[in-house]
């Protein structure tokens, strides 16, 4: 974008790589505390049951055991957490609500001793009727997962964002959101074509490779080191549990071994903290993968979308209904639902709209945030429905999108920021690449789609930069480095703003005791919001340094201007930062701190702070004998405004798209009765190296249209969002029949290709083109 | 290996958890180590807890994800399911042994240059598996790399940068052998 920039805009090597490549990088799981004991969790072995009694005598007598803690021991503490609805029991009180729910903590000298003693804790249950899926949960007179409501919404900004209402205890409805404008019923009645699509988005597990773990020390104040993406949010939950001032609760997140949303908000931190509180020693708790799956999964969704178009393919109305299985506790599902509702109808002009979304409690493991935040669930329905309607009216799927897409500056949601992207141009880039490299094989198909997400979350961000006496700089941010590369990008912004070398900048992150407040690390916000805070902190440091220079030189402040790494006077005299700091303090000591604050004001007044764009497409090849789907080509367009580190942006897009392919082709948690049939990564299949597409085209679209530093917008989720629908459409075009659910496992695809009636030739055109191809048979109602 | 437990003693005398009933001698990253340990201990527990070599990570614990890969007598093994007692008399190599005098080796540098890592949790396993591959086949094709590394999971990168890094490392090595600057 700008040839004058020194560091921003370059694919500089990430400063965290050195430690990560040598094994020196510290993750939570690598950290101990002096005198530490080890915890293991006794978990419920049934879905819904009253706890009659817990006998811990034998366990307490076992070798090495330090303590056994149950909900009964938590007198004086607030025994639950939850940033939206504080419904989540740290340890099951009175009853268990899902298989795998923590019932007791065994603390021992070693993890082995704790594991051995777990088997000695005797729990007597009285089974209760359960609701294992949304149909059962929403049936009349269904047993209730939660009999009563919980106190006020903990998170003020959530109310601002969604107008959340409190749950009623008369049903298993955890949360409901309705979004409506115009008169959709009348518009559908007058439409030339009306088409309905129902799809199922699978129950997923994010599988961050570092399982949830934490080490806690309670000594009147509390220090927890954990895998948390949002240490400040976790701090707030822990302060409420112990009734401590925020200053007495310190949450530190070192390097995080993958997050993808699954480590947002509170997870195992309260368990480790109450264990330390109870036994009076630091306690470490490390979950295995199975326990992690039972800690947080992804909301599955059933979505029905109806669209009416006029004879030229213009959308007249969309009506959608979605039901999410959110499991036993709300966690962040109300927000995931709210986002799915406003993301499901796509970046299109929809003059009449009604979306009803419901998040439902069931006796299954609790669901919460996942990369894309409701967009993957909603987009699958919206884009598939659009592809099908295009096919019905004989229109190119690119054309129907171009005809309806919202243009730059145009409002997508009433009162929200106009679209800060050129989606039509992005789509042209995408489809050119996809169709340009098209294979002639009849068993291939291409699919593509678009999404925009109201990203960035609530804009509260703070940062500090410290200019040292040698002119090097330390930047402090509460934002977490979990792989996405923020440590590099934030350092590049500092280097750019202050005109110092990137190698002389260090970024320290995510410790509520030492780094400044950051609301969350999610919603792709870091580059934009923390970036702005860092820019402002640099400007503040520079203002202070100019004043100090003026004082030192006895010049009026107006005579001083900024240059790289220092200042210059009107007469051409230059002082570096080191000269100023040293001169002002009068010795080889001291430093200058700049502070940057971001709130809902100025460029971040209008919500959302930016729209995150997803423009992705695939070409697949289907083996009709086996149903195996190979992804031949993956194309993404990163519409990021300005790429501060282009290689890091491409890396995010490829990683996100690959996760999307996992959900599209392989991944699904399957409940078999009360428990999961595949709570491990042998049976829960994630993408492997051999699954990687043979041709990958990761494009950047830089138009400087974001509010972030140098015109940047966020990325990291966008490329994932359209992948589900794109893959579904590509498979449909390859086999001649529309699937109605993900993942597209070999068995499902094989059955689908067998279902094509002999009288109805399998669709053989390599790409959908309404003028020549037969319509793909579509199992859904029209 | 010496053991205080013998088959004749039967089940009753099986050592209690944590009892360091056997002694091993091994070499870890070139350093000789002699330790008494619990025969139940896995290699990764021995490396991480006894030797404080925490570079080797654990994820699945089931020998499928590859993050815990280390080399035992140059063979890649999953240290999460390999008994520490079985490295008696053998040489172990871990990620901590790759860099020389604080400088990344060619494979590590290639990973950095290709952005072949993000969170880095899977990286030690990939580095060790790729080391084993390059020691067997100094010039692997893309197909060979995909096949050899297919048992190592990465959730962040989408894999292609890792394939590119291994190829770059092979080319770098060939360049060095041919006297070209790397
Ligand atoms: S942790 Fe050993 S293979 Fe996964
Ligand atoms: S870099 Fe995060 S899992 Fe591979």
Image (cartoon, rainbow, N blue to C red):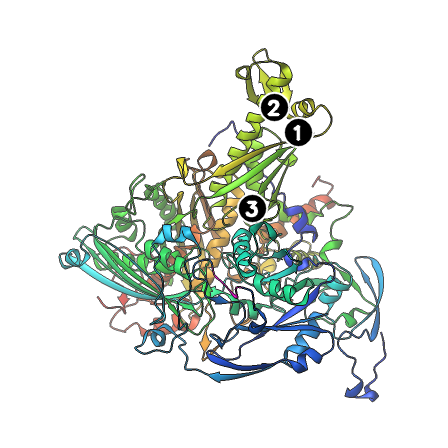
Nearer-the-camera pick, A216 or A79: A79
Residue B45 lies in what quarter of the image? bottom right
- Dot 1 falls on a residue whose secondary structure is loop
Nearer-N-terminus badge (2/3): 3
- Dot 3 falls on a residue whose secondary structure is loop
Nearer-the-camera pick, B40 or A369: A369
What is the span of residues highlighted in magenta in the rendered image? Answer: A78-82
Circle 3 sits on which residue? A478
Circle 2 sits on which residue? A566
A103 lies above or below A188: below
The residue sitting at 71% across, 39% down in the picture is: B181
How many numbered marks appear? 3
Label 1 Cα neighbours within 10 Å, binned few <14 / some 14-19 / many ≥20: many
Circle 1 sits on which residue? A471
Asked if the beta carbon under badge 1 is closer than 8 A to the nearest atom of ligand 2, the reply is no
- Dot 2 falls on a residue whose secondary structure is strand
CA distance for labels 2 and 3: 27 Å
Residue A623 lies in what quarter of the image? bottom left
Is A79 magenta? The answer is yes
**Splitting the image into four quadrants, where does ligand 2 fall?**
bottom right
Nearer-the-camera pick, A699 or A152: A152
Nearer-N-terminus badge (1/2): 1
Q: Nearer the viewer, mark 2 or mark 3?
A: 3
Q: Are marks 1 and 2 in contact (CB under 8 Å)?
A: yes
Q: Which mark is residue A11?
A: none
């Amino acid at each position: 974008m700008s040839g004058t920039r020194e560091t921003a805009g370059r694919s500089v090597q990430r400063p965290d790589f050195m430690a990560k490549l040598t094994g020196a990088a510290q993750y939570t799981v690598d950290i101990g505390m002096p005198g530490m004991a080890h915890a293991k969790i006794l978990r419920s072995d049934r879905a819904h049951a009253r706890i009659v009694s817990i006998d811990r005598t034998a366990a307490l007598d076992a070798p090495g055991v330090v303590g056994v803690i149950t909900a009964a021991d938590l007198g004086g503490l607030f025994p639950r957490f939850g940033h939206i609805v504080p419904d989540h029991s740290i340890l099951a009180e009175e009853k268990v609500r899902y298989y795998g729910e923590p019932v007791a903590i065994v603390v021992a000298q070693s993890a082995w001793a704790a594991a051995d003693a777990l088997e000695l804790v005797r729990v007597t249950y009285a089974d209760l009727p359960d609701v294992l899926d949304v149909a059962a949960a929403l049936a009349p007179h269904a047993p209730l997962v939660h009999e009563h409501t919980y106190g006020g919404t903990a998170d003020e900004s959530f109310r601002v964002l969604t107008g959340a209402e409190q749950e009623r205890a008369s049903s298993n409805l955890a949360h409901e959101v309705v979004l409506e404008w115009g008169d959709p019923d009348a518009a559908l009645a007058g439409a030339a074509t009306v088409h309905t699509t129902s799809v199922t988005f699978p129950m997923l597990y994010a599988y961050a490779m570092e399982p949830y773990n934490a080490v806690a020390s309670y000594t009147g104040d509390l220090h927890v080191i954990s895998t948390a993406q949002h240490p400040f949010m976790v701090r707030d939950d822990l302060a409420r549990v112990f009734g401590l001032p925020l200053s007495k609760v310190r949450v530190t997140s070192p390097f995080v071994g993958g997050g993808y949303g699954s480590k947002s908000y509170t997870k195992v931190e309260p368990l480790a903290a109450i264990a330390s509180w109870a036994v009076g020693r630091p306690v470490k708790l490390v979950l295995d993968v199975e326990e992690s799956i039972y800690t947080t999964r992804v909301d599955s969704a059933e979505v029905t979308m109806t669209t009416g178009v006029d004879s030229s393919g213009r959308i007249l109305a969309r009506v959608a209904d979605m039901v999410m299985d959110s499991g036993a506790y709300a966690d962040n599902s109300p927000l995931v639902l709210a986002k799915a509702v406003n993301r499901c109808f796509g970046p299109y002009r929809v003059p009449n709209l009604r979306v009803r979304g419901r998040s439902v409690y069931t006796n299954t493991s609790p669901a919460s945030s996942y990369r894309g935040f409701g967009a993957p669930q909603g987009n699958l329905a919206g884009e598939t429905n659009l592809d099908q309607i295009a096919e019905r009216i004989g229109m190119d799927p690119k054309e129907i999108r171009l005809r309806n897409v919202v243009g730059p500056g145009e409002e997508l949601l009433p009162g929200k920021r106009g679209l800060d992207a050129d989606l039509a141009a992005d789509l042209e880039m995408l489809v050119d690449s996809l169709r340009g490299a098209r294979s002639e094989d009849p068993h291939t198909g291409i699919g593509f789609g678009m999404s925009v997400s109201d990203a960035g979350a609530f804009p509260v961000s703070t940062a500090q930069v410290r200019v040292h006496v040698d002119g090097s700089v330390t930047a402090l941010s509460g934002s977490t480095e979990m792989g996405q590369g923020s440590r590099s990008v934030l350092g590049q912004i500092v280097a750019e703003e202050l005109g110092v070398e990137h190698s002389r900048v260090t970024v320290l992150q995510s410790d509520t005791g030492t780094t400044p407040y950051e609301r969350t690390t999610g919603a792709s916000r870091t580059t934009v919001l923390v970036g702005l805070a860092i820019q402002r902190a640099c400007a503040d440091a520079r203002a202070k340094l100019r004043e100090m220079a003026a004082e030192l030189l006895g010049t009026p402040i107006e005579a001083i201007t900024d240059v790289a790494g220092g200042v210059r006077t009107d007469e051409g005299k230059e002082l570096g930062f080191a000269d100023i700091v040293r001169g002002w303090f009068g010795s080889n000591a001291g430093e200058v701190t700049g502070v940057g604050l971001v709130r809902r004001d100025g460029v971040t007044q209008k919500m959302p702070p930016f729209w995150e764009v997803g423009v992705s497409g695939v070409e697949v090849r289907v083996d009709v004998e086996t149903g195996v789907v190979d992804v031949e080509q993956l194309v993404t367009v990163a519409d990021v405004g300005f790429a501060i580190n282009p290689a890091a942006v491409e890396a995010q897009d490829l990683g996100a798209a690959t996760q999307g392919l996992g959900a599209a082709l392989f991944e699904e948690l399957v409940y078999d009765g009360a428990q999961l049939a595949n709570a491990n990564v042998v049976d829960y299949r994630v993408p492997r190296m051999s699954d990687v597409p043979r041709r990958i085209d990761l494009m950047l679209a830089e138009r400087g249209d974001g509010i972030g530093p140098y015109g940047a917008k966020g990325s990291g989720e966008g490329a994932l969002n359209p992948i589900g629908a794109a893959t579904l459409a590509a498979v449909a075009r390859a086999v001649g029949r529309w699937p109605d659910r993900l993942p597209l496992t070999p068995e499902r695809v094989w059955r689908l290709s067998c279902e094509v009636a002999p009288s109805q030739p399998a669709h053989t055109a390599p790409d959908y083109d309404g003028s020549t191809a037969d319509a793909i048979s579509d199992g859904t109602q029209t | 290996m010496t053991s205080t437990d013998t088959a004749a003693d039967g089940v009753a005398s099986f050592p209690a958890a944590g009892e360091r009933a056997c002694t091993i001698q091994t070499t870890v990253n070139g350093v000789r180590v002699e330790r008494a340990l619990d025969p139940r201990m896995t290699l990764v527990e021995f490396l991480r807890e006894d030797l404080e070599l925490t570079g080797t990570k654990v994820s699945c614990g089931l020998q499928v994800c590859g993050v815990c890969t280390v080399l035992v007598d140059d063979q890649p093994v999953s240290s999460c399911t390999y008994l520490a007692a079985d490295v008696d008399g053998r040489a172990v190599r871990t990620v901590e042994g790759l860099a020389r005098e604080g400088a990344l080796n060619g494979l590590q540098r290639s990973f950095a240059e290709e952005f072949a890592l993000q969170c880095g949790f899977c990286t030690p396993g990939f580095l060790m598996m790729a080391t084993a591959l390059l020691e067997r086949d100094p010039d692997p094709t893309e197909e060979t790399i995909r096949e050899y590394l297919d048992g190592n999971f990465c959730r962040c990168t989408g894999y292609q940068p890792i394939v590119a890094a291994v190829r770059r490392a092979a080319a770098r090595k060939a360049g060095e052998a041919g006297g070209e600057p790397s």
